[in-house]
Image (spheres, rainbow, N blue to C red):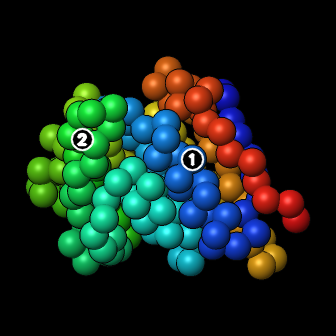
Amino acid sequence: MQHFKAYLRDEDATAQLGAALARVLVPGLTIYLHGDLGAGKTALTRALLHAAGHTGKVKSPTYTLAEPYQVTLAGRAVDVIHFDLYRMSSAEEFLDAGFRENFNKDNICIVEWPEKGAPVLPAPDLNVLLNVAGEGREVELQALSDLGSLCLDRLTFAAPPL
């Protein structure tokens, strides 16, 4: 398994990582975000979406469960769907909402609290693990598919000095 680790000393470093991830996005990508409350999952997603060209507000989908955004990648309009499954009481809610159809070769799906959608949630291409560490965050990106490996191969991110 290919992986990448870094220390994000502040929110600006998190935004820089989000921008770096935006540069390697490809249609069909599924990203799982893991971390406790306040670990920076939504902040990372917000930075990624803004760096990918979304100009509006990016809100946490905690109550709506999913927020769709449209960005342009390599001249092509691509839907990015940001899921937050924290409030789901069962994986069947994910199926009942029809979310599974969003996971296809055309969309990019970013999922916070993916464990709430197990076992019906489609497998990720990238796992992003965020952990609070002192004043900042430790982050690990794990490629779990060829598409995820392609993204990590193309990722250019230099963590700021400690």
Residue 125, percent from left and from top = 46, 34
Locate the C terminus by quadrant. bottom right
N-terminal of the two: label 1 or label 2?
1
Determine whether 143 is above or below 79 in the image: above
**At label 1, which amino acid type do we have?**
Ala
- Taking the view exactly as shown, the residue that stands out farthest to the top is 146
Nearer to the camera, 53 or 142: 53
Nearer to the camera, 115 or 66: 66
| Residue 135 seen in render | yes
Q: Is residue 152 left or right of residue 145?
A: right
Q: Kindly state the secondary structure of the residue where label 2 is placed.
A: strand
Q: CA distance from mark 1 to mark 2?
A: 18 Å
Nearer to the camera, 134 or 120: 134
Specify the label residue 20 is tagged with. Answer: 1
Specify the label residue 1 is tagged with. Answer: none
Task: Identify the residue shown where x is 61% and y is 36%.
Answer: 155
**At label 2, which amino acid type do we have?**
Val
Residue 5, percent from left and from top = 74, 46
Residue 92 location, quadrant: bottom left
Determine whether 2 is above or below 122 in the image: above
Determine whether 162 is above or below 4 in the image: below
Crowd class of label 1 (few under 14; some 14 to 19; many from 20; radius 10 Å): many
Task: Identify the residue shown where x is 67% and y is 29%.
Answer: 2
Locate the N terminus by quadrant. top right
Check disc 2 and report the residue beneath it. 78
Residue 129 location, quadrant: bottom right
Q: Kindly state the secondary structure of the residue where label 1 is placed.
A: helix
Residue 38 location, quadrant: bottom right
Q: Is residue 95 left or right of residue 86?
A: left
Residue 158, percent from left and from top = 75, 48
- Taking the view exactly as shown, the residue that stands out farthest to the right is 162
